[in-house]
Structure formats: C-alpha cells, structure tokens
Amino acid sequence: MRGRINKGIGGFYYVAVDDEIIECKARGKFRKEHITPIIGDEVEIEVKNGKGAITKIYERKNSLIRPAVANIDVIVVVVASKDPDPATFVTDKMLVNAEINGIPSIVCINKSDLANTAELYDIYTCAGYKTVCVSALENNGLDELFEIIKGKTAAFAGVSGVGKSTILSRITGMELETGTVSDKISRGKHTTRHVELFKMRGGGYVLDTPGFSSVETEDISLQDLESCFPEILKHSSNCRFRGCAHIGEPDCAVKNAVLEGVIPQSRYESYKELYEIQKGKKIWK
Ligand SMILES: Nc1nc2c(ncn2[C@@H]2O[C@H](COP(=O)(O)OP(=O)(O)OP(=O)(O)O)[C@@H](O)[C@H]2O)c(=O)[nH]1
Ligand SMILES: [Mg+2]
Ligand SMILES: [Zn+2]
C-alpha cells in the first residue's frame, strides 16, 4: 500500500493511506543505509499480523533539515508583527534554506491586530517574496493565504509563538494545540513538539512544525549565497567586479541599492551576517 507519513513519534510513523492512519515501524535496512523517514515522505507499507512496516521511501521531490519535512510545494515562513517581536534574521535564514533546497516560499505576517505590518510587508515584497498580512485571532487575511496554498503541500515555519498552529487551526478547522507566548517563555518550551501533516478541505496538505528560537543555515558556498537573496542577485550583475561579494568592494550595485533603499537594510544585514558565518565555516574545514 502506498501512503504518506503524517507524523512520527517514539520510533513509530503514522502513515495515511486514503483516509486511514496506520502505525508503522521503519524497516531496519533504512537505519543501515542511514536513511530516516521524514514527515511528508511518500512510502510503501506492508501490514502483517496487524503490524505496519515501511518498506520503501519513494524518491523525494525535495526536503528540508529544519524543520524536517519532505515533498513540499511551498514554505510559509510566519513572522509576527509583535509578541514575539519580528525576528528578521531567523526569518531570512529560513528563506535562505528554502532557496538552497529549491523550494518556493512566501512570507506570512501574523498578528496584524497587534502592530502595524507595513514595514515588514515592504521588506519582504521588496525582497521579491509574495507576502500576506493576517490576523489569525481576528480571522483576517486567511482567505488570501488559503487561496495561495490550496491544493498544495504547504509547510509552516517560524519561531515559537508567531501563531503557526493558530493559523492552521483556522485553516483546517481542527483544534491544534496552541500556547501563549508568555507561557512558552516561562517554561522555555515551544508548544508544538512534532512536525505533523494535515489534509486540507478541498485538497492539499499543511504541515505544522515546532518553532525554534534559532535556525542554522545549511552549508552553502560564498559564491552561491547571493542567489539565496533574490533582490541581491537581481542587482549583482551591475557590480563593477565580477564575483563581487557586496561587502567592501567599490562600485557595488548591491550596496548602492541598499543606500537608495531599494534593497531593505535588514535583508542586507542578514546577507552580511551569513556571509561571515559561511566564511568562518570554510576556515575551520
Ligand atoms: N493577538 C494575536 N494573537 C495571536 C494571533 N495568532 C496567534 N496568537 C496567539 O499567539 C500565541 C502563540 O500561538 P501558537 O499558535 O501557539 O504559536 P506557534 O507558532 O504554533 O508556536 P510553537 O508551536 O511554540 O512553535 C497564542 O496565545 C495565540 O492565541 C493573532 O493573530 N493575534
Ligand atoms: Mg505551534
Ligand atoms: Zn557588489
């Protein structure tokens, strides 16, 4: 039987076959081959004596490491206008990881009821990302978001407390566990503990993921880093030097665009910080 992994807990995988969920273990051969099934995987399963086993993982269209998800059509990077304050560097790192893996992404600014969203909206539309402003609390803007993701497999990512599970509860009509931001901070824990895939009404899937406070970017060469920032890539062909890193070179079209406000300052800061991080990795390798 062919199915799709919905969630994994304590060594068990829950595989959806049509509308049935079957608890499965992964065959030992996967461990030997260092392959770990992940949520979103298309798999072949066998049921014997009431026990399910994953026997095959179909080739992944794509995958991400954090959150660990596979076969994604779009990543929705959620950021809150307030409570918690917008974490632009983490948001940018998530967008970079999506770019590295060739997965389209959009930005969803939640909690539009708490603070003005215009600045964030400008940053991410200038960067070239489709951006939607919503308030899960007041049920605002969710139709527009739904129109973008319907029929697709959409993974929701973003730091803890931005409201991923609240948005997904609205969209799926299910009651996902949510928790207040002050509670998350006082207990030092995020609410959603596991990645879980849900079917949407009218077709498509959404994946809820645990919010991390920090995200590592995957390895990428310094030359390729600019291609993970669509707005930087767009201007880089006008730099005086080929292979310009847009850090200290003269006549840099990217830095000029930052000065003119065409490239958002916070995006350029993220680029520079990632450039330094990747450069550091190279030295120690
Ligand atoms: N004011 C306001 N609060 C919201 C909104 N959306 C979510 N919240 C609140 O924000 C808090 C965090 O929401 P969650 O849905 O648990 O956040 P999460 O991103 O899933 O967090 P983790 O599972 O820990 O990663 C809850 O108290 C929600 O009620 C919104 O649009 N406006
Ligand atoms: Mg959650
Ligand atoms: Zn340059």
Image: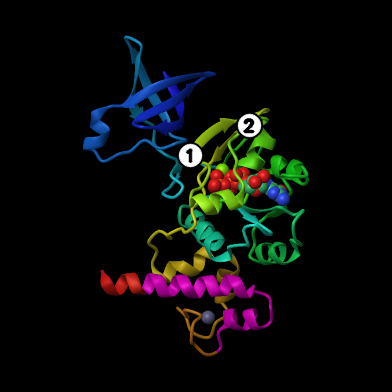
**Magenta residues, as a range?**
251-279
Left or right position of 258 against 17:
right
Q: Which residue is mark 2?
A: 175
Q: Residue furthest front?
A: 186
- Contact, mark 2 vs mark 1 (Cβ under 8 Å): no
- State which quarter of the image contains the N terminus: top left
Q: Residue at x 78, y 44 (%)?
A: 138
Residue 276 magenta-highlighted: yes
Q: Residue at x 64, y 73 (%)?
A: 264
Which SS does the magenta portion mostly show? Answer: helix
Q: Residue at x 63, y 65 (%)?
A: 127
Left or right position of 245 against 161:
left
The percent position of residue 81, horizontal first and vertical second, equals: 69, 59
Residue 231 magenta-highlighted: no
Q: Which residue is mark 1?
A: 195
The answer to which quarter of the image holds residue 235 is: bottom right
Residue 137 vertical placement versus 88 (above, below): above
Mark 2 or 1, closer to the camera: 2
The percent position of residue 188, horizontal first and vertical second, equals: 48, 52
Residue 179 vertical placement versus 240 (above, below): above
Kind of residue at badge 1: Val
Left or right position of 264 against 279:
right
Question: What's the distance in space between the residues labelled 2 and 1, CA to CA?
Answer: 15 Å
The percent position of residue 275, horizontal first and vertical second, equals: 44, 73
